[in-house]
Amino acid sequence: MQAVKVLEIKQSVFADNDEQARLLREELKKKKVFLLNLMSSPGSGKTTTLTRTIEALRDEFKIGVMEADIDSDVDAKTISQTGAKAIQLHTGGMCHLDAEMTRQGLEGLDTEGIELAILENVGNLVCPAEFDTGAVKNAMILSVPEGHDKPLKYPLMFSICDVVLVNKIDVLPYFDFDMEKCREYVKMRNPNATIIPICAKTGEGIDQWADWLRGQVKAWREA
Amino acid sequence: MQAVKVLEIKQSVFADNDEQARLLREELKKKKVFLLNLMSSPGSGKTTTLTRTIEALRDEFKIGVMEADIDSDVDAKTISQTGAKAIQLHTGGMCHLDAEMTRQGLEGLDTEGIELAILENVGNLVCPAEFDTGAVKNAMILSVPEGHDKPLKYPLMFSICDVVLVNKIDVLPYFDFDMEKCREYVKMRNPNATIIPICAKTGEGIDQWADWLRGQVKAWREA
């Protein structure tokens, strides 16, 4: 595997994260960089989904990926094999990224020429939901083995996400996962959320997800 | 389902959590209450494992359970059906419990007569690892669908756990999970960690886990 750049993220000094996020979003708009914030529990398949997403959209957009982790650089190495520009962000034990930390990541990535930047946030359903990263859209992955009750237990995460990818649908026969209840609970938290069942491993549903993301990028550019 | 007590936990005011944890551990020792802190990602099977644990040990120990969650009381309801004393703790959005918050939970539970108290921490591999709850032992569940690489990505969690339960081994055939690599990575973080493969759904491995826990309680009582 090729070496990847690893950036040690510094803790933010800004008290008003919402204002920092607003400023970052404005800047990115001027630079025409669409930022997607991708969140989930540990092990729900963020990196595999990202790999599939890049494969589906790399001919249309120049893509850059920031892989945030407390430690290790395995995810950025995996992503860099797709040909996308990738950087590993180390949070130094911090459980989320806020807007200023995301800005550090974007500077490390260098967004010159990048049209679609994706932040793979720290695997955690609690803290990342509390901090606006400056992204245009928030996406989250809920995997089938985690159970359909997660929107009941992590309300904020589901209420701030524009799209919920229900991943690992290939193992639905082996788990007590009720897709209808899942939809109902997600809609309870956020009636406007789009829900897309996928299997990142086999590629099922990735077309629909790529369509959604393509549509968001185009609508935002034209707005 | 019967109604369960729900306690809204207040944020701690103590700066020195390690000192609070030490004091709580001393107090619990005097009261002969063994406290176990159980941690994992969302959806890895904490509550099902707890149900099995109670079934295996309820004839030997009087058990009390604190179910910490940001919201909802589904877990405490499930646990109360086992006959164990159960209380739901709401963290009000907080991503972990520290020693003072655990003390609030124990007071709400009322440990009079309880020999084994179990705290089901918030589903999160990051923040709970940073705060000593005052527990005698830390246990964590890593479920097969999450992947064997988690000790690489969440080093602190694996380094502070005395025992790692590898849950959902019934679905091993459907996932690329390498048990040997898992053992190797866990041992890299904590050479003294005990690793027990289980399936909480079918009960496989629960005997071994109950043996471990029984042994810990007895050794601590006699120390």
Image (tube, coloured by chain):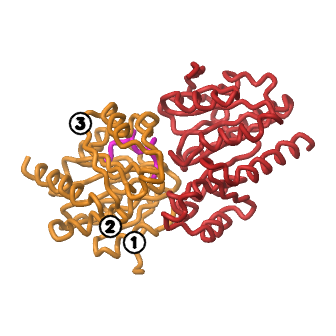
Chain colours: A orange, B red
Residue placed at 62% from the left, 48% from the top? B200
Residue placed at 40% from the left, 37% from the top? A151
Kind of residue sitting beneath label 3: Asn
- B62 relative position to B157: left or right: right
Provide the chain ID for the residue under circle 2: A
- Residue A124 is one of the magenta-drawn residues: yes
Residue beneath disc 3: A192
- Residue farthest toward the right in the current orientation of the protein: B222
- A44 relative position to A38: left or right: right
- B129 relative position to A196: left or right: right
Question: Which region is colored magenta?
Answer: A123-133
Q: Are marks 2 and 1 in contact (CB under 8 Å)?
A: yes
Residue placed at 73% from the left, 21% from the top? B110
Kind of residue sitting beneath label 2: Thr
Mark 1 to mark 3: distance in Å? 33 Å
Residue beneath disc 1: A78
Query: Residue B4 placed where, x, y %?
Result: 59, 21
Question: Callout 1: 10 Å neighbours few (<14), some, many (20+)?
Answer: some
- B178 relative position to B135: left or right: left
Mark 2 to mark 3: distance in Å? 26 Å
Query: Do the residues at pointers 2 and 1 share their chain?
Result: yes
Question: Callout 3: 10 Å neighbours few (<14), some, many (20+)?
Answer: few
Provide the chain ID for the residue under circle 1: A
Label 1: element kind: helix
Residue beneath disc 2: A51
